[in-house]
Amino acid sequence: MSKKNKRRNDRGINFKFASKKWLAYTKLHVKRSTYENYVYLLNKHIYPYFGNADMYKINCSMLNAFTAEKLTNGRLKRKGGISKKYLQDMLSIVRSVIKFSEQEYGIPNKIHSVRGLKGEKPKFRILKKEEQTLLTGVLMKEDDPMRLGILLSLYTGMRIGEVCGLKWKDFHEDEGTVTIRRTVQRISDNKGSTIFLIGTPKTQTSARIIPLPGAICKVLSKSKGDPDKAVISDRRDYAEPSELRKYFKRLLKKCGIKSIRYHDLRHTFASNCVQLDFDIKTLSEILGHADVSMTLNRYVHSSLQIKRHYMGLINI
């Protein structure tokens, strides 16, 4: 250990100090939305527990106690625990700060043996075929440009931020494709206000070209406007994702369909593609997943009937 690091350790370094240094470094390498989320989780969940803790004393026992507390009473505005997925995000930050402190200040990492949480399978509701038919029929009769966002999510799997960020110049009528170049979202600035962000897609694989089903291409062609206008707002500025969610909720009520999350349109599209025997690599690229395993784990599940069929092919 260098003399510089030893002197810093002698003075004592608490978690908040180390995390501030880690944040300054991390800010240079992540998106603004990711950085602001780190700050939010630190301020609201992690600092109340670890903020003043001496980095030398953070060990497996403390991390396990934090985990148990959050799973039981982790919600901020009401009783109950947070999800394992949400907790994983917090634990990832704590681990990163500890690893940073080990590399920067020579502070021993005492949490190597802590086992990760078993992830929860995401819960979502797939629209039934009759619900899809009903919703599509109503959308075809609507004249609100926001209907195009719902159609695109249901029939291409586009995320809400992607359809809100789509401009008419991203629609290539002759090729029958749309190009995902940007995503929009509103995030907390951790100062009591919010920021509307227009940024690049979620990951490198999220920036993609999606071939359109013929019927959807025709609908877009009939509605096509100024190349610099946003598709679902018919304005030069983008519609907020919250606007599209509200419109979607009103439409579901109009159709008499049980309320679902907007993101479930993406899940419905993916599940339909699996039933149509889409090549999984192709589907993964259309969805903009980082890798095929995400698509396989989330959407590809063999039924007992299929398993029975394949087992019946085995001869003795």
Image (cartoon, rainbow, N blue to C red):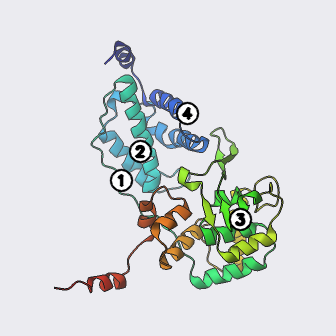
For marks 1 and 4 on the same chain, the one whose residue lies earlier in the sequence: 4
Measured Cα–Cα span from mark 1 to mark 3: 34 Å
Q: What amino acid type should be assigned to the residue bearing mark 3?
A: Lys
For marks 1 and 2 on the same chain, the one whose residue lies earlier in the sequence: 2
- The answer to whether residue 100 is above or below residue 248 is above
Q: What amino acid type should be assigned to the residue bearing mark 2?
A: Leu
Badge 3 is on which residue? 246
Badge 2 is on which residue? 91
Measured Cα–Cα span from mark 4 to mark 3: 35 Å
Judge whether residue 144 can be spotted in this image. Answer: no
Judge whether residue 303 can be spotted in this image. Answer: yes
For marks 2 and 4 on the same chain, the one whose residue lies earlier in the sequence: 4
In the rendered image, residue 131, in percent from the top left (x then y), is placed at: 62, 82
Measured Cα–Cα span from mark 1 to mark 2: 10 Å
Q: What amino acid type should be assigned to the residue bearing mark 1?
A: Leu
Q: Where residue 28 is drawn, which disc sits there? A: 4
- The answer to whether residue 259 is above or below residue 81 is below
In the image, which is nearer the foreground, mark 2 or mark 4?
Answer: 4
In the rendered image, residue 203, in percent from the top left (x then y), is placed at: 54, 50
Badge 1 is on which residue? 117
